[in-house]
Amino acid sequence: MLYLHSNELNGSIPDEIGQLRMLNNLGLYLSQLDGSLPSSLGNWSSLAWLYISYNPLSSFIPLEMGNLTNLEAIYMSDNFLTGPIPPTFGKLMKLTELHVFRTELTGSIPSKLGNLKLLRRLCLYHNNLTGSIPSTLGNLTELTHFYLHENQLSGNIPDELGNLWAMIHVELRQNQLTGPIPPSLGNLTDLRYLYLRRNGLSSSIPGFLGNLRAMLYLRLDENELTGPIPFSFAHLFSKLRILDLSDNNFTSPLPAYLIVKLQEMMNGQNGQESQDKSLYMRHAYGIMDYYDSVNVIVKGKEILLLSSLTIFTTFDLSLNSFEGNIPDVIGHLHSLIGLNLPTITSRELFLQPLET
């Protein structure tokens, strides 16, 4: 093991480091290392964990990393790495964690990543990746966290993602994805977080999404979705904390039968008894814990809650084409903190519980 992290090391990583052939853990994160990654790192045949995040590294990822066949975790985020994701990553059959986010990667996602059958977390967000999401990623049946947001990905969401039975958190927001939401996503019955906002998704919401009864946060806003909200969608709402369908092309009267199903928002303090005592959504994540963040609309402005309160509940249907009156049942949502409806002309989000 070699841990030199959280220091003020600078300069480039020396090529001679590749001579440490028996190295199994390397921690160089939170330093000032720059320059390129040496191709000699491909000599680390015993390496299991690689931590080089939070450095101003500015090179391509060497193809030789595909030689590290004992590698279980890669943390290479918050760098200035450029170029494509090496297709040789598809040879890292023991890999369970792949974190290369907030860098400057370009090109498409290699289809060979679908070979990584043990992968649990795939985090490639906030890059400049283009092209479509490979259908081969549907082979990653151990995957629980799937983060491709804030790229330039295009095309349809592949149906094969419905094979990812273990999925808990999907982030595909802020890309250029088009076409319908695949009904196969209704197979992901453990899914708690689904963020598809700010794409060009069209067609109606598939009724099979009603199978997602563990859902906590659902963000489909700023797309081109149409039609009425399906009746089966009501089954989502037993645990839902945030629902945002705003800025689409939904029609028909506001669905009172759905609002009736927003149990957590109805239950008030009683609805909190079954929740974790922490006020924040908290999960173990790699070498540290993290607290979920979420964007919400407050008085027409987007704000980021860096830690998502379990007591924060919002319901946003604004900027659609719903017809008729606001259903009376909305007055029974005692725990609702945020409300944003299309028939409220100010389109403001009211930050206080509703009174009956």
Image (cartoon, helix red, strand yellow):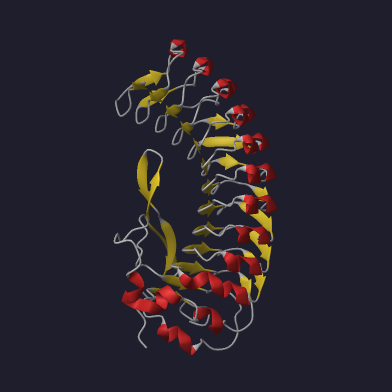
Residue shown at 50% from the left, 78% from the top:
261
Depicted 81 relative to depicted 229: above or below: above
- The answer to whether 250 appears left or right of 122 in the picture is right
Residue shown at 59% from the left, 69% from the top:
210
Depicted 277 relative to depicted 254: above or below: above
Give x and y (percent) for residue 256.
54, 84
Name the quadrant containing residue 337: bottom left
Residue shown at 29% from the left, 26% from the top:
7
Residue 203 visible? The answer is: yes
- The answer to whether 182 appears left or right of 350 in the picture is right
Give x and y (percent) for residue 51.
41, 29
The quadrant of the picture occupied by the N terminus is top left
Give x and y (percent) for residue 67.
57, 20
Name the quadrant containing residue 113: top right
Depicted 51 relative to depicted 282: above or below: above
Residue 99 visible? The answer is: no
Comparing 19 with 119, the one in front is 119
Give x and y (percent) for residue 41.
50, 18
The quadrant of the picture occupied by the C terminus is bottom left
Q: How many marks?
A: 0
Depicted 2 relative to depicted 147: above or below: above
- The answer to whether 12 appears left or right of 134 in the picture is left
